[in-house]
Image: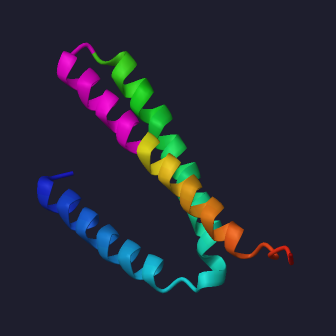
Amino acid sequence: MDFISILSIFVLACFVGYYVVWSVTPALHTPLMAVTNAISSVIIVGALVAAATSGSPIAKWLGLGAVVMASVNIFGGFAVTARMLAMYKKKEKK
């Protein structure tokens, strides 16, 4: 594929992702976060495989960067999900 095709697919995916995420009702937000955590874990596996099979040091550093950014995304997703689930717990009466 040429660069223009790849760029147009990327821009279209950004628009679709934006509208999908912002049109989600609050009741479906927690399952959506769980799915994005799963996607980030697949990104980590792909980055590890790409970094391990490459011979270039630049590719290994880029793979490390991808692993770090996806790990931060997973941790943040779990933190947000835990916080949202805590909102639905019944509060104890004193």
Instruction: Residue at 78%, 72% (x, y): give it.
Output: 89
Q: How far across and how far down the image is residue 16, in percent?
A: 37, 76
Q: How far across and how far down the image is residue 25, in percent?
A: 58, 86
Q: How far across and how far down the image is residue 5, in percent?
A: 19, 61
Instruction: Residue at 28%, 21% (x, y): give it.
Output: 60
Instruction: Residue at 53%, 42% (x, y): give it.
Output: 41
Report the side of 88 relative to 22 (left or right): right
Say which of 84 and 90 sits in front.
Answer: 90
Report the side of 82 relative to 54 (left or right): right
Query: Picture quarter containing residue 30?
Result: bottom right
Q: In this view, does 85 lie above or below 77?
A: below
The question of residue 43 being in magenta is answered with no
The question of residue 65 being in magenta is answered with yes
Q: Is residue 41 above or below residue 21?
A: above
Q: Is the magenta stretch mostly helix, strand or loop?
A: helix
Say which of 76 and 39 sits in front.
Answer: 76
Number of marks in the rendered image: 0
Q: Give the range drawn in magenta.
A: 55-70
